[in-house]
Image (cartoon, helix red, strand yellow):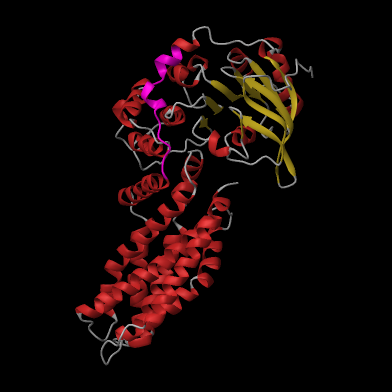
Amino acid sequence: MKAAVATTEAPQGAAVTATDLVRRYGERPALDGVTFAVPAGSTLVVFGPNGAGKSTLLRVLATLLRPHGGSASVLGCDVQRQGWSVRGRIGFLGHDPLLYGDLSARENLDYHARLHGLRDPGRRIAELLAATGLERRAQDRVHTYSRGMVQRLAACRAVLHDPEVLLLDEPRANLDPAAGEQLEPLIGRASGRTRVVTSHDPAGGLAEADLALGLRAGRQELLGAAAAISADDIAALYADTHGMVPA
Amino acid sequence: MPHHGSPHGDVMRLQTRSPEVAQRNTPSTFGAARAVLQKDLRLERRAPQTLVAMTLFSATTYVIFHFALDRDSVDGQLASGVLWVTMLLAALLGIGRLFVSDRDEGGLEGFLLAPVDRTALLFAKGAALLAFLLALQLVAVPLFALLLLGPTPDAGTWLQLLLVLVLADLGIAVVGTLVAAIAVQTRARDLITSILALPLLVPVMIGASNATAPLLAQAGAEPLPGRWLALLALYSLIFGLLAYAVFDFLVED
């Protein structure tokens, strides 16, 4: 596999950095010496087959998991020692929407707004529900929503407090193209936020990336500017593992 | 390294962000605890599970005691024992379900992602469990009096019993919240809840049953023994401080 341009030094103005990051589950390393730096306003797309460590990386950056070695920082704050400062400045969208099924969309967002100390949550919530086309169902319980609607609402939750950094785990899963477009201003490149995004789509992922990171079995196999990496380089991450390439 | 910034990123960002959002208060521990508590009570009101299960369990247990003891009524220490064993087992149901919605629907992670003091969750869950126990006893204690209790307590006795119930419930809520926070991090949650909670709640049961027994004496209510009330208060205080000290470590990775 081709090693692309390495970006292992933390440059001035890097919004997200990882240095020799290690995280294990028991004896199994989920991340093993991952190092990168993402400049403010840029998008890092993380590729890799299932179990490569993509979600673990996002969870470490989100302060949900502690690193077992190395370090990571978000907006200049160490995620382990200054997690308090990191929370509230990141928006996390993982595989679980982090929403209560027996609460309505508005109640879920209001709950998270209160946890984040928003001063005028009603206005912000109305704005986001309108932007994602959910205002008509805002009073309905979330368990009555389709998966795509839940994902849109989860995106609202992730950006509710106007975070500077977005950590997005396959954010377009369960979304049709129209819904994907709807979320673009909130969580896409157009948001202007610093983003770390995981993807299984080489072409689509590279199209929205400034930087690309390839993981396999927790190890960093590929890192560099997206412009210098081809979809074939990404596909090779999967081919070596499963003997097939993603569609 | 090339930086492919969005050609119109700043413009779009302004359009998608609300200026008011930047005006955030740092949420207080009390404010966050209130948000979690209100959410929990709303969930229970909307889809009743915990309280209904606790109440049905208590009613069934009283019926079982009625037939198992083969007596029309009980009094004194036996009555106190029946009352508190039933409350303890019903409380286990509540403890076991305290973090269920948060675990199943990712609410715990949602809370951990917020810039709030983790002890807000301890306060909220403790208050929720206390509320469930008090609500349970509003139904279960009169039911106990109706089905099993020999002596008919007067108003003064009911007030003293209320004091014992509140103090004991406080102890159960503090210990129960701590145990539930430990159990939710494990795979064998249901087992861990019972295995940890039962021995830790023995002092509460000793204090509560000994404080209650004189109130339910056949010969008429005797004075409330202050030392058992003190034991209940002290135990709650010690476990409250312990829970406050370790709660962050329990809920975080």
Residue B146 visible, this orientation: no
Farthest residue to the top: give it: B7
Q: Position of residue A210 (x, y in %)?
A: 62, 14
Q: Is residue A44 left or right of residue B101?
A: right
- x 25%, y 76%: residue: B158
Q: How many marks?
A: 0
User: Residue A173 versus residue B186: which sits nearer the camera?
Assistant: B186
The image quadrant of residue A139 is: top left
User: Along the line of sight, which residue is nearer the eye, A183 or B253?
Assistant: B253
**Residue furthest to the left:** B155
| Residue at the farthest bottom position | B219
Q: Is residue A156 above or below residue B181?
A: above
Answer with left or right where residue A27 lies relative to residue A193: right
Q: Position of residue B56 (x, y in %)?
A: 34, 66
Q: Position of residue B111 (x, y in %)?
A: 47, 42
Kindly identify the residue that appears in the image at 30 percent across and 84 percent down. B216
Residue B4 in picture, x, y percent from top left: 60, 10
Q: Quadrant of the N terminus of chain A?
A: top right
Q: Is residue B33 above or below residue A79?
A: below
Q: Which residues are magenta?
A: B12-28
Find out whether residue A73 is within the magenta segment.
Answer: no
At 56% from the left and 22% from the top, the residue drawn is A195
